Image (cartoon, rainbow, N blue to C red):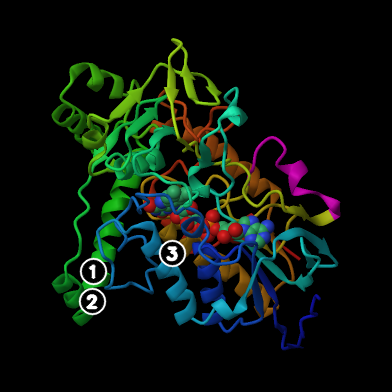
Amino acid sequence: MGRTAERTEWGGRRDLRFAIVGAGMAGILSAIRLKEAGLTDFTVYEKADRLGGTWRENTYPGLACDVPSHLYSYSFALTPELSRRYSPGGEIQGYLERVARDYEVDRHMRFGDEVACCELATGRWRLETAAGHRDEVDVVIAATGVLHHPRLPEIDGLDDFEGAMFHSSRWDHEVPLDGARIGIIGTGSTAVQIASALVDRAAKLSLFQRTAQWVLQQENPPYTRDDRAAFRQNPAQLTELHETLSHLFGVFANAIVDADSPEMEMIADACRANLEDNVRDPELRERLRPDYRAACKRLVVSPDFYEAIQRPNAELVTEGIERIESAGVRTREGRLHELDVLVLATGFKVDAFMRPMAVVGRDGQTLEHLWSARPNAYLSISIPGFPNFFMLNGPNGPVGNFSLIEVAELQMAYIMQLVERLRSGACREISATREAMEQFEAARVEAAKKTVWMTGCRSWYLDDRGIPATWPWSFDRFRAEMRAPEPTAFEYR
Ligand SMILES: Cc1cc2nc3c(=O)[nH]c(=O)nc-3n(C[C@H](O)[C@H](O)[C@H](O)COP(=O)(O)OP(=O)(O)OC[C@H]3O[C@@H](n4cnc5c(N)ncnc54)[C@H](O)[C@@H]3O)c2cc1C
């Protein structure tokens, strides 16, 4: 049952107790940073039976990081042992497990314990888990993920299918794939990775495309034994590589918020060249050609998707799905695509964040009510009226083809500065002011209208109003903003 933190106070300094919700990449990071700061009174609540978040949940064939994995690594825990430029998913899961162990934060984790409710009561957060465990903490860090709650397609007859059917993040490894007739609904990064991985195993692979994607061709070479030995001998080389990649992807991130930048044009040219050079059949090429600008939707990165979809046993189906039937997928022109396996690579409910967890802030205000139109937070970290409740990878943060680890590290460094104010005794409660939140949001929405995400495509970046729910400025600006909290943006009590 819930423990009451021992709270000593002297010279204004306070001992603080923390709850971190979620043991994915961001929860592990939070735990490490707290521990490094000497704040060891914390529990990481994880509803699953293992850490890893995204990389535990997604085990589909072909899963790989789509930014170079030396960038998709904690800056303080770079590893020489990566097998490829873009690590396979299992390797990232192994990496996260190892880091949690090395930094001895795994022992703070409670698995199989979903936080159901967080309620502010007399300046502290009372937590209750689905299993009935209670805790009381000074600070909550919500590291509950974005691409976490599977989104199923709204297609008639979904339940009628008699073959094996599952969402890409709930892969059923019992289902035989060799020689099977496999259908994939969706054409985002996940669908493309699965298609490339399975085309040689399937008797027939049908990819049901609603929207064509721009595909950036990137080779995925292995690191040789010599490469890894060199990294081991010279760790500075790893740091240099991380920094170079961070700079390069920073340029990319800057480009995507400026639809007319020369870098954006270079990216578009590279995608066009991939399509023109690598798809032979002009009719197929046109069906694969998007009718919107590159990077309006998340760019798909793949070494070999066009090669895969041109295999004799592969079919790109663009007729539109009429309904799912017991034997397969019927498309609008009346054809039945008979299938043994149907994979729903249809993405995630990206506006759920920590919900369904109930969060009740000051004066009984609920997050559910506050976010009933759409989720919102100051700098995606703090919510007015929800003091000492901070989020990593929260609403409207940076998204795109770069490392969310880098984003989370910057956010956590910012949060730690707020935590230091609490620890120093300067105040007992911190949350963004309503004015700061409103000004930030108004500026964000205006800036978002000028980004490439608003140039005429339908994507998961867009909210219910069609406004990109993302950080709309450059990555340099994000870094600068994360350097230190603006004192007037916060209310201290
Ligand atoms: C297929 C796929 C590929 C991706 N590839 C990349 C990539 O190449 N580069 C990149 O930067 N990003 C990528 N991402 C994004 C990826 O989600 C992030 O990089 C990162 O893993 C997010 O970490 P997180 O800790 O914020 O969230 P998550 O990994 O989602 O972890 C959240 C954790 O919180 C737990 N949790 C949630 N609610 C509760 C609760 N109430 N109580 C207890 N526990 C709870 C969940 O079980 C989960 O373990 C990818 C995502 C997907 C789905």
Which comes sooner in the sequence, label 3 or label 2?
3
Point out which mark residue 240 bears: 1
Residue 374 is situated, as x and y percent measured from the top left of the image, at: 65, 38
Q: Is residue 255 above or below residue 43?
A: above
Which comes sooner in the sequence, label 3 or label 1?
3
CB of mark 1 near ligand 1 (< 8 Å):
no
| Image quadrant where residue 352 sits | top right
Question: Which sits in the foreground, 164 or 46?
Answer: 164
What segment carries the magenta color?
363-376
Quick one: label 3, few (<14), some, or many (20+) residues within 10 Å? many
The three-letter code of the residue at mark 2 reads Ala
- What residue lies at 68% left-to-right and 49% top-to-bottom? 355
CB of mark 3 near ligand 1 (< 8 Å):
no
Question: Which sits in the foreground, 337 or 357?
Answer: 337
Question: Which sits in the foreground, 34 or 190?
Answer: 190
Residue topped by disc 2: 236
Q: Is residue 87 magenta?
A: no
The three-letter code of the residue at mark 3 reads Gln
Residue 224 is situated, as x and y percent measured from the top left of the image, at: 16, 67
Cβ–Cβ below 8 Å for labels 2 and 1?
yes
Residue 409 shown left or right of residue 68 in the figure: right
User: Which quadrant would the C terminus be assigned to in this image?
Assistant: bottom right
Cα distance between the residues tagged 3 and 1 = 24 Å
Cα distance between the residues tagged 2 and 1 = 6 Å
Residue topped by disc 3: 93
Residue 362 shown left or right of residue 477 in the figure: right
Q: Is residue 472 above or below residue 329?
A: below
The three-letter code of the residue at mark 1 reads Glu
- What residue lies at 54% left-to-right and 67% top-to-bottom? 51
Can you tell which of label 3 and label 1 is closer to the viewer?
3
